[in-house]
Amino acid sequence: MKALVYDGPRTLSIRESREPIAGEGKAVITVIATGICGSDAHGYTGETGRRVTGQIMGHELVGRIAHDAPGLPAHTLVTVNPLIGCGECEYCEVGETQGCATAVVIGVDPALPGSFAEQLVVPIGNVVPLSESTPVLHGALVEPLAVGYHAVMRGDPVPDDRLVVIGGGPIGQAVAIGARRAGVTRILVSEPVSARRELLERLGFASTVPDALPDASVSELGGKPTLVVDAVGIDHTIASALQNSTTRARIVLVGMGASIMTFAPYALTVAERTLIGSYCYSRAHFESTANWVAHVRPELDLLIGSTRPLTDGPAAFQSVASGDGEANKVMLLSQQLDSGRVADTTTTPVPGRYSERFRTDH
């Protein structure tokens, strides 16, 4: 089978790789599409040191079961929860695998080949079936949408919260959508890139440039935010979260833009703000997101910028890493879509701003 292989910083190649075999308790998936995650892009550049030569990346996927497996007939449309825990600790026992001390991620751990390939093998327990009514490419959005939803839920949102999302990239977009799912109606996204702000506006969210955040919080939310989600994770953004939030605000950090961050502790302690970490998702949040996506959400079309064949992977990664590509998700296609397309395409979403009818439904 063909696979996109990491050959070192900023170098990828298409190679022939051995087809995976389903051992006991595992299933082979024929991959249809995989989204390029920000962590993949940072791994590609070498800046995180979390990718090794010879590795196959990719964990935001949709595909079909290749061969009958227990509870999974061949051709079943599926996505995959890429988190694999020990299965025995107190966190794994309650479906909080992200808290497992030995948890690994498919496509991130070098020993677990990812989905930038024509097929991959995964534990059956990590396979999440999708309704056949699910638009196929939306299945590859489940993973990043689950990250956003989990981040919001870590902040214990309530309907009358005033929420600011710092960063309007794919995870920030997922956070805003997750907050809307959770019933939050006052949502403002701080984002410097105009193309991303335009996308957020089309999704139905208010947006602002970072320098105007204090004034925009008052005009759009009615006051300083009670809940902030930092989807970037660098010194400047955590400082903004602390400076621009109200007393006793909850601040959720989901972005991992820097390995070390510094901030003024008084801004946290004196105003009794709460700083909360968020990593990946629980099993329940992943599966509920898959069910939510299955209800045919037309606004999700806006999250997909372009699709390109797997063989275009090196060029696609270069574009994403350089920042000169899409404001939204780029997906690599390992198989032809039902329409027969596999060449570069751009999604054409319903025009205009999405309305209140997309703001609820859990």
Image (tube, rainbow, N blue to C red):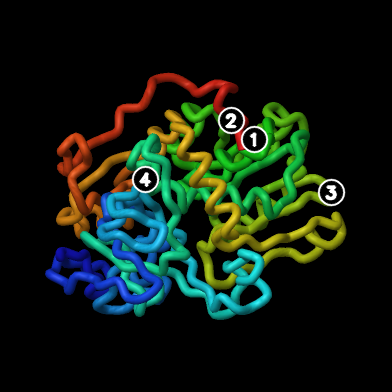
The outermost residue toward the left is 16
Three-letter amino acid code at the position of disc 4: Lys
Within 10 Å of disc 2 (Cα), the crowding (few <14, some 14-19, many 20+) is many
In-front residue for pair 285/150: 285
| Image position, residue 144 (x, y; %) | 47, 51
Within 10 Å of disc 1 (Cα), the crowding (few <14, some 14-19, many 20+) is many
Whether tag 1 and tag 2 are in contact, CB under 8 A, the answer is yes
Q: Earlier in the sequence, mark 3 or mark 2?
A: 2
Q: Which residue is mark 1?
A: 187
In-front residue for pair 263/318: 318
Element type at mark 1: strand
Element type at mark 4: strand
| Image position, residue 301 (x, y; %) | 38, 33
In-front residue for pair 63/116: 63
Residue 119 lies, with reference to residue 9, above or below; the image says: above
Three-letter amino acid code at the position of disc 1: Ile
- State left or right for residue 182 relative to residue 341: right
Numbered tag placed on residue 206 in the rendering: 2
